[in-house]
Image (tube, rainbow, N blue to C red):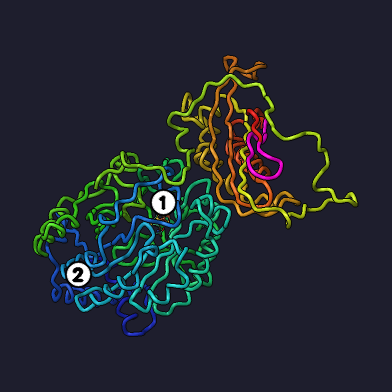
């Protein structure tokens, strides 16, 4: 029995009896609390059956089960979901509600006291209310808490019902307080909805704890750490900073990960009075508190300082595999056993074998198996999925690092427009000579599309950095700095899409349009230079071509949207590379290459 367990129990007991929560102790109170808690736990442990199947060869008791309810998600967080997507299991491979409850029942009867629902995104699973209600019925068997980790997108209206059915603990994932960055990190809109969910959660008396999970990624959201800390001033929330972890397809790089120790230094620089707070039993977070703040902080250092020795978790994936360690690719299918007719005793035997196979600790940061292990979305979600990757709505930037180098002689430009160029009237100037919007009220709604492209010319060193070739392994500080900004192509691609959607906010007289699709590609090119470029580049010039195709059904065309997408995409590449190439880059050749629909007809122009 350790101190943390004792202190946790004391707080649990005080909660149960409606007394104030005993979270912080003087040394004297701590010793008394520890002694009382020790005797109470010894009593409970003696009373309660704990199956040897849930104890591993390092004597760790596994009383915490995380159940993934689905592989689906309404966000696409870059660190969780590979950019090329994941293949979803066929529907009949996913555990049914009855199978989930049967396994939960077995685990609880064997000693599990905490269940957490996760995913994918658990709130997208149909019948979630019913699952929570049926889990709640396991309380008499020993279940003490039902938690859920969610992105909060579809939560605010449903949360009261989940709590009514038995949900007690909520972890909300939110990595940024900036709506724009939110779209970059999650590749989807929805920041407002998450904030609303947070508000509802904080006003739900039935919830015993509300935590905010923040994955910190260098160069993306690390500048917001203190903003998150400020949230704890008047909100009863625990903000937990999580180290960025490597999973298949998430392009993890040590340089993008900020160790918890460094984050703590940043926080204590601003709040020197910060104190260590008691951790919850077996909690993965090291807790801290700023005196005077209502909430608290936690640091989850899965990478820099793992907590394997006290790990008490087992995971059940949505397709019914038991996983004994997040970072171990080994899995055993409980679904197949159940569907083959296994009895509970046989299932427990299989679980026991898996638990016995649990390693003492996971591999070091650099050696974690990201090849055969699943992406996070499928862990929280048996087979390695590598060969089963399918393209979801395309995010092709990922491919550039693999094979996309094109050797192109630059084409000369040629018009092949079918439209007349004789009408030189400026459509945005009214009869009084002043700027105005064009009234499109009488125009027909038609299908329209436009493609635009442009290039950013960059020096070879930056090109190698972006494509992962040549001297990309350089230890040069500026190169590392640029690389730490993340995946240049992916960020530029997302920025282009977001820029496109905001065209009417940026270009004063543009109409807001209902865009039905935006697709953006960035392609590294290496061509023979017409004029010798600066430096020794062997007569070659290096560029990244950005192409955007936008579609809509509307009364006016989408050329401006396509041009904005390309411009923002290229500017983002500039921003990402300026540390290594700021003095040499140039952007140009931004043109509309193709257009369909509308009265002025179709045209094509070579880029
Ligand atoms: N969709 C839900 C959500 O986002 O909260 C539940 C599933 S998600 C896989 C569970 C947690 O894992 C989230 O808090 C998420 O931020 C975290 N996570 C996912 N990928 C991660 C990574 N590469 N490194 C650190 N944490 C990660
Ligand atoms: Fe979805 Fe959660 Fe993964 Fe984000 S972290 S993609 S919300 S499962």
- When the figure is inspected, residue 600 is found, relative to residue 48, above or below; the finding is above
x and y percentages locating residue 557 in the rendered image? 67, 46
Residue 311 in view (yes/no): no
Res 531 quadrant in image: top right
Q: Residue at x 37, y 45 (%)?
A: 246
Residue beneath disc 1: 243
Residue beneath disc 2: 105
Please state the extent of the stretch shown in magenta in the rendering.
588-602
Residues at marks 1 and 2 touching, judged by CB atoms closer than 8 Å: no
Horizontal side of 366 relative to 141 (left or right) equals right
x and y percentages locating residue 591 in the rendered image? 67, 34
* 597 is within the stretch colored magenta: yes
Secondary structure found at label 2: helix
Horizontal side of 221 relative to 95 (left or right) equals right
- When the figure is inspected, residue 331 is found, relative to residue 13, above or below; the finding is above
Residue 183 in view (yes/no): yes
Res 288 quadrant in image: bottom left
């Amino acid at each position: 029995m350790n101190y943390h367990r004792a202190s946790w129990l004391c707080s649990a007991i005080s909660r149960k009896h409606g007394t104030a929560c005993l979270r912080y102790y003087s040394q004297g109170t701590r010793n008394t609390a520890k002694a009382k808690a020790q005797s109470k736990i010894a009593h409970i442990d003696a009373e309660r059956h704990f199956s040897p199947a849930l104890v591993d060869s390092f004597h760790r008791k596994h009383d915490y089960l995380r159940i993934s309810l689905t592989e689906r998600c309404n966000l696409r967080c870059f660190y969780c979901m590979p950019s090329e997507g994941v293949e979803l299991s066929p529907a009949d491979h996913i555990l049914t509600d009855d199978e989930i409850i049967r396994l939960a029942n077995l685990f609880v009867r064997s000693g599990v006291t905490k269940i957490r629902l996760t995913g994918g995104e658990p709130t997208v699973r149909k019948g979630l209310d019913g699952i929570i209600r049926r889990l709640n019925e396991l309380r008499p068997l020993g279940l003490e808490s039902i938690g859920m980790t969610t992105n909060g997108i579809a939560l605010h209206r449903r949360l009261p019902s989940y709590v009514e059915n038995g949900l007690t603990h909520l972890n909300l994932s939110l990595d940024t307080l900036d709506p724009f960055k939110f779209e970059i990190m999650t590749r989807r809109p929805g920041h407002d909805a998450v904030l609303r969910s947070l508000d509802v959660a904080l006003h739900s008396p039935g919830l015993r704890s509300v935590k905010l999970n923040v994955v910190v990624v260098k160069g993306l959201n690390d500048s917001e750490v203190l903003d998150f800390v400020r949230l704890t001033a008047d909100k009863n929330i625990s903000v937990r900073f999580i180290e960025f972890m490597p999973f298949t397809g998430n392009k993890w790089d040590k340089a993008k990960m900020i160790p918890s120790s460094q984050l703590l230094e940043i926080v204590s620089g601003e709040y020197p009075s910060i104190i260590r707070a008691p951790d919850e039993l077996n909690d993965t977070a090291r807790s801290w508190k700023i005196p005077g703040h209502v909430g608290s902080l936690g640091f989850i250092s899965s990478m820099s300082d793992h907590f394997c020795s006290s790990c008490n978790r087992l995971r059940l994936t949505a397709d019914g595999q038991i996983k004994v360690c997040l970072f171990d690719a080994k899995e055993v299918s409980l679904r197949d056993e159940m569907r083959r007719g296994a009895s509970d005793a046989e299932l427990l035997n299989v679980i026991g074998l898996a638990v016995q196979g649990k390693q003492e600790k996971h591999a070091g940061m650099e050696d974690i198996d990201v090849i055969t292990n699943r992406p996070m979305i499928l862990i929280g979600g048996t087979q390695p999925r590598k060969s089963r990757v399918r393209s979801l709505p395309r995010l092709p930037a990922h491919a550039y690092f693999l094979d996309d180098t094109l050797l192109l002689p630059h084409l000369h430009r040629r018009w092949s427009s079918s439209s007349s160029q004789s009408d030189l009237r400026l459509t945005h100037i009214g009869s009084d000579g002043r700027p105005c919007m064009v009234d499109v009220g009488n125009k027909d709604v038609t299908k329209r599309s436009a493609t635009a492209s442009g290039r950013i010319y960059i020096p070879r060193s930056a090109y190698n950095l972006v494509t992962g070739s040549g001297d990309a392994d350089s230890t040069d500080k500026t190169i590392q700095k640029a690389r730490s900004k993340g995946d240049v192509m992916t960020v530029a691609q997302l920025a282009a899409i977001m820029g496109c959607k905001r065209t009417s906010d940026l270009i004063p007289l543009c109409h807001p349009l209902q865009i039905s699709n935006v697709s953006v590609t960035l392609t590294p090119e290496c061509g023979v230079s017409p004029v010798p470029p600066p430096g020794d580049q062997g007569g070659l010039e290096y560029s990244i071509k950005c192409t955007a195709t936008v579609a809509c059904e509307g009364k006016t065309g989408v050329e401006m949207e396509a041009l904005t997408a390309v411009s923002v995409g290229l500017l983002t590449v500039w921003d990402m590379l300026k540390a290594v190439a700021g003095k040499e880059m140039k952007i140009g050749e931004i043109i509309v290459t193709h257009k369909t629909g509308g009265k002025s007809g179709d045209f094509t122009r070579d880029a």
